[in-house]
Amino acid sequence: MKRKLILSLVLAAATMSVQGQNGVEIRLNQVGYAPQQEKVIVVEGVNPAGKVRIATPDGRKLKAKSVRKATSPWSGKVRYVVDLGQLSQPGTYQVSIGKQQCSLTVAERPLQQVATAALRLFYLIRSGVPITMGGDYNRPAGHADTRVLVHNSAASPLRPTGTIISSPYGWYDAGDYNKYVVNSAFSIGLMFAAYEQQKDYFARLDTNIPESKNKTPDLLDEMMFNLQWFFTMQDPADGGVYHKLTTPNFEGFIMPKDCKQPRYVVQKSVTVTLDFAAVMADAARLFEPYNQDYPGFASQAAAVAERAYQWAKEHPTTFYRQEQLKDPAVSTGTYGDGNARDEFFWAASALYRLTGRQQYLDDAVQYKPQRFSTPTWGNVASLGAYEWMANGHASAKAAQEMATDMLNQLYAYCDEAVKGVETSCFNAPYGNSPRDFGWGCLAEHCCCQAMALLYADAMKGEPAYRRYAMQNADYLLGRNATGYCFVTGFGTKSPMHPHHRISAADAVEAPFPGMLVGGPNPGQQDKKDMHNAVYPSNHPDESYIDDAESYASNEIAINWNASLVALLCWLDAIN
C-alpha cells in the first residue's frame, strides 16, 4: 500500500482555491500572503459586489469590494478582481462570498517553507548516491556512472570509441534519468544570479542536506554536487565539453537502482562548452571565500573555464546534431541549439568579471543582445546581462557602457511587462497573452519574468516592480484559471501525478514536495502518446492536466525548479 505523506506544516499554512456550487470559484494564493502584500482574489461565476465578507483572526467583520471585471479573451469566462484591503494581522482569515467560503493566511514569511522545499528538491534528485535525509523519499543509490562509455560521436585520439570513463554525481535533469550539461549550467547560472543578490539570506538558509553543517551556504553546497560532475564532462585532452551523459533511450517508470541501459557521453558542442565556461567562471568567484570546505576548487574552476572558452573559440560552429548519432542512436532530450551568440555573450561576460581581461570584454561587446528577454536554456543572453548589472566595479569605459545598456534594456522590458496588469484576469503581468503559455511556461515566462522584475528593483534600489513579481508568484500558487497551486506538496490543490519517474515508482503516494510543473500548454504535444488522460480544455491558460502521462504540461525539470528557487527565495528574503 502506498504511504501517505502528511504535510502538516504546509497544510496548516495553506489557503484555498474554492470551486463551489453553481460554478462559483474563488482563486487565490494558496500558500499565504505577507502582511504588507496586497490581498487580491479572483471570483468567477458570480458578481461579488456587496457580497464579500471577511472574518478576521481576532473576530472582527470586514467587507471588501470588487475593483473590476475582466473577461477571458479565450474562454469568455467573466471574472471579478476583488481587493480584500489591508489585512496585515498574521493569522487565518475567512472570506465569504454568498455561501462560498475560503481561508486566506497572512504570515510574516509565508514563502519560507515552499522556497526551502524548491531548493531542497535538488538534493532529492541527486544521482549516484543514496538519499538518506529524504524521509519517506530515501532511496538506494542508482546510476553510479563510474563506467560510462565514450560514444563514437565523442571519440578522440586519447579517448577512442568505447573508452570507459568515470562521471559520477550531478542531478537527474527532469522526469528522466539523464544528465545534461546545457540545462544544468543554465540552472546553476540562474540560481547563482539570485544568490549574488541575496547572499545574506542564503547564508542563513538551512535546507537539511548532508553538507548543511559546513561553512558554505547550502545553495552553494548543492551547486557543488553538480559541479563535481561538470569536471568529468570536459575532455582533458582539448577542453571541449560533452553535450550530455545519457542512455540511448529513456528508461521506463522504474527506480534508479533498477535501470540497466548502458550510459554514454556524446558529442562535444560549442553551446554546451560555453555554458560550462560561464558557470565555472562564476563558480570560481563565488566559491573563493569557501576554500576551507572546497580547497583548490576556485582556481581549478577558473582554469577549466578558460580552457573551455578557448575550445569554443576554435570550434564556433560545432553544434550538437543528435540525428547524426549512430551505433547506438540516441533519442533522449536534445537541448540542441544552432546559434551560439548568446552563449558567447554569457561566457565572455562571466570570464570578464573573473579576469578583467580585454579579450573577454571585446567578445562580450561583439555578441551583446539588442533587447532583454527572459532567460531560457536556449537563450542565455540575459544571464550575461545579469553579469554586467551585478559587476559594479568595472572601470573600463566599454564595460560601464555595457552595464548601462543592459540596465536600460531590462527597464524597458519591465515597463512593457507590467502594462497589462490593470486589465488582466488574474491581476498579474504573466498570463495575458497566448504566447505566455507553452512548454515550461510557468518557469520561463512566469518565474523568470518575475525574477527580472526583482532584478530591476535591486538595480534601482527601490521597490518599483516588487509587487508585480509577487503577483506572478500569486499566479503560480493558485490565482489562475486552473485553480492549481503548481508547486507539489503545497496548497490545497496541487499536482499529485507529475511526469517524474521516481515519484511514479517509489510507492510514496505524494510526489516529491517543492517541484514546479511545466504548466498550461496549448500545444498538447503529448496528446498523441496519452492512453487514459484527456486535457480538460484547449484554452491557453486552462490546457493543463495533472497526469503522469502529460510530459507537455506536467513534467518537472531542473531549469524550471531553478527559476522557482530564484523567485521564491528572493521574495522570501525581501518580504
Image: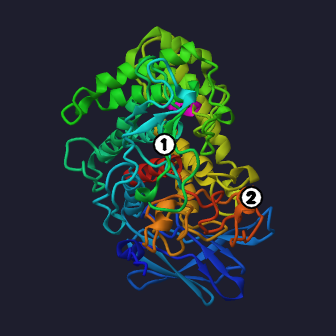
Q: Is residue 384 magenta?
A: yes
Residue 320: percent from left, percent from top? 62, 30
Circle 2 — which element?
Answer: loop
Residue shown at 60%/51% (left/top)?
446
Residue 356: percent from left, percent from top? 41, 14
Residue corresponding to mark 2: 522
Residue shown at 32%/62% (left/top)?
134
The residue carrying pointer 2 sits among few (fewer than 14), some (14 to 19) or many (20 or more) residues within 10 Å by Cα, namely many
Identity, as a three-letter code, of the amino acid under mark 1: Arg
Q: Residue 338, located in which quarter of the rendered image?
A: top right
Residue 325: percent from left, percent from top? 63, 34
Q: Quadrant of the N terminus?
A: bottom left
Q: Which residues are magenta?
A: 381-386
Residue corresponding to mark 1: 263
Q: Taking 22 as reference, is 297 above or below it? A: above
Q: Residue 97, located in which quarter of the rendered image?
A: bottom right
Residue shown at 57%/67% (left/top)?
478
Identity, as a three-letter code, of the amino acid under mark 2: Pro
Q: Taking 94 as reference, is 135 above or below it? A: above
**Furthest-top residue in this view:** 358
Residue 82: percent from left, percent from top? 62, 71
The foreground one among 496 and 528 is 528
